[in-house]
Image (tube, helix red, strand yellow):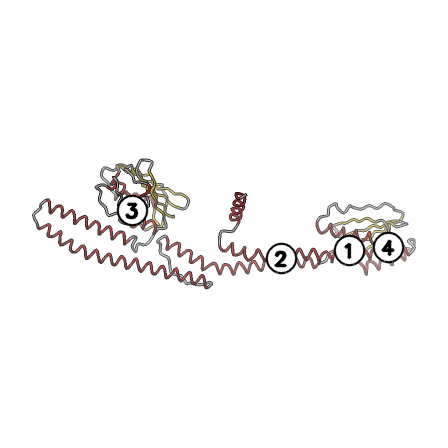
Amino acid sequence: MRQDERSGKGLIKRLLPRTLFGRSLLILITPVLLIQVIATYVFFDRHWGKMTTRLAYAVAGEIGMIVDLVESESLSDDLAFSGIQTESVRHLDLDILFRPDESFLSGKKLEAGLYGWEFMVAKRLSLELQAQLEHPFSMDIDFPQKQIKVSVLLDGGILDISFPQRRLFSSSGYIFLLWVMCSSVVLLVIAIVFMRNQIRPIRKLAAAAERFGKGRDAPFFKAEGASEVRQAAHAFLDMRRRIQRQVSQRTEMLAGVSHDLRTPLTRLKLQLAMLEQTPDTEAMKADIQDMEKMIQGYLDFVRGQGDEVAVPVDMDSFFKRLLGRTSHSGVEITEQIEAGLEAVIRPVAFERALTNLLSNAAKYASHIWLSMHKDGKVIEIRVEDNGPGIAQEQYEEVFKPFYRVDSSRNAETGGTGLGLPIAMDIVHSHGGKIWLEESEHGGLKVIVRIPL
């Protein structure tokens, strides 16, 4: 039973509109249409039914009166019958015809070709005629001609009484239906125009947030719309300014620290160059080089993507340049790049991220597999190696700044523990994702997915 409930809820979710515009229209239109359907049903069930009964009663009474007049006069008196015929057409809109010496009533059954309201009207007229006429009768409804003929069996023959169908139908029903339909259309148009104006600021905010989340330049937009929407827009704009200010301050601070640290390191290098070259001085030079690498790594991590602007880039050419600039002695690289793909990226920053991934793999492996292909609306990049790999419980830890793996994968390789964090920061700034898996080749697999 719970499974049926879950499947029912899933079906409802699939049928519901996915956009805020569609759901808002559904909320507005559904109760209005429901009220109009109920009002229409009540109208036709009560008002229209009563009107039909009264019209059928009036027509049946007029037919009964004509039958009584014809019976009271001599049917052989053509002048008297002609007078009745003329007056019935003029005042009652009833056309009468007497067929003498006939005693067989022919007429279609009411069920034949009648559906819906037409059958109900004809049935109501038949019941009223049965109540008011003492003679046998039949009905023949000719819809193409919009005429109804009632044939009454009299002593001397058959009296045919014809009248238009409009005598039994009230125009108020059609007017009411027309009014309901027109009002629904007008309401729908007004609701669409109103909701579009209300949704437009939300769409602008969503587009700006998406661009900013992908690291792209999000142009300034004016906060407008309802007070809640304006409040959200102002909060987003303030958040963007704070983030940009903090990143700028952090970059400037680290640039200053780097300058201050590099100055004494440069003096140390000059002093060491003037000393006699001994194993101790060589060790000190190596330490200074390590310090310079660490400082540069810190700067790269803090700087992230910098102020570089995202542009459309042909990924095939991008990877060719990347592999042309990347060389790792003793490491074989097998590439499988899908051609014809284009993505909006920051070329320098994204190249730095992939270079970190390739360099990290080259430290521990003899063979690297690099692939890129399109998967729906994203580009998937894989960097695999045949190195020792790392434990699965450390897959998330290695993306933390300064985290160093305590295993054979980190032995005697140095590093600051910032390669993967820098790559993750750059990938996230492009609106992408990055994670680790175990490679089929025995080492580590790094998967990067960025939107097209």
Mark 1 and mark 3 lie on one chain; the one further toward the N terminus is 1
Name the amino acid, label 3: Leu
* Mark 3 residue crowding within 10 angstroms, few (<14) / some (14–19) / many (20+): many
Q: Residue at x 92, y 55 (%)?
A: 74
Name the amino acid, label 2: Gln
Front: mark 4 or 1:
1
Q: Do residues under tags 3 and 2 come within 8 Å of each other at their CB atoms?
A: no
Query: Helix or strand or loop: what does disc 4 sit on?
Result: helix
Farthest top residue in view: 441
Query: Helix or strand or loop: what does disc 3 sit on?
Result: helix
Front: mark 1 or 3:
3
For disc 3, the marked residue is 420
For disc 4, the marked residue is 67
Farthest left residue in view: 276
Q: Nearer the viewer, residue 402 or 20?
A: 402
For disc 1, the marked residue is 56
Query: Helix or strand or loop: what does disc 1 sit on?
Result: helix
Residue 146 image offset from top left, x and y in percent: 74, 52
Figure check: 179 above or below 119: below
For disc 2, the marked residue is 36
Residue 437 image offset from top left, x and y in percent: 34, 41
Front: mark 3 or 4:
3
Q: In the visual, does 206 lie left or right of 414?
A: right
Mark 3 and mark 2 lie on one chain; the one further toward the N terminus is 2
Name the amino acid, label 1: Ala
Distance between the alpha carbons at the discs numbered 4 and 2: 44 Å
